[in-house]
Image (tube, rainbow, N blue to C red):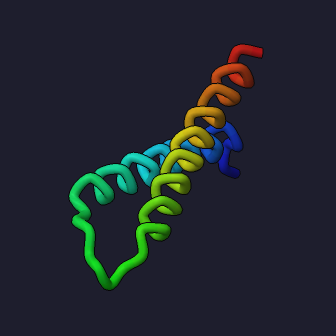
Amino acid sequence: MIDFRLFIAAIALALMLIGVGVFRYQMKATSCPLHNRLAGRIAVIAGWVSLIGGISLMGYLIVLVGT
């Protein structure tokens, strides 16, 4: 049976990597007149939410392991 702490750590790491990946992709993106800027803004917001969610889960895991 899988340890739920390991599962939470894997999800937290995945969320943080997704957030960093979104930021790296957006840094290389150039503006195109055919695409809407709203999509880029939504991507940055999704990246922040993913990164903060991953960091929060990792903090929760640290508190959980400490108890």
Give whichever of 19, 63 is nearer the camera: 19
- Residue 19 as seen in the image, left or right of residue 4: left
Q: Position of residue 29 (x, y in %)?
A: 25, 63
Image position of 3 with respect to 61: above or below: below
Question: In which image quadrant can residue 22 be found?
Answer: bottom left
Name the residue at 70% across, 51% down: 1
The residue under the point 48% across, 44% down is 16
Q: Residue furthest top?
A: 66
Left or right: where 14 falls relative to 64: left
Residue at point 70% right, 15% down? Answer: 66
Hey, which quadrant is residue 5 in on the image? top right
Compared to residue 14, the image places residue 67 above or below, namely above
Give x and y (percent) for residue 24: 29, 51
From the viewer's side, name the closer residue of 57 and 23: 23
Name the foreground residue: 38 vs 58: 38
Measured from the top left, where is residue 21 in percent x and y?
36, 53
Check the image and name the residue furthest to the bottom: 34
Residue 29 vs residue 12, the one in the foreground? 29
Q: Is residue 43 above or below residue 51?
A: below
In this orientation, does residue 45 appear?
yes
Q: Residue furthest front?
A: 33
Q: Quadrant of the C terminus?
A: top right
Residue 10 seen by the camera: no
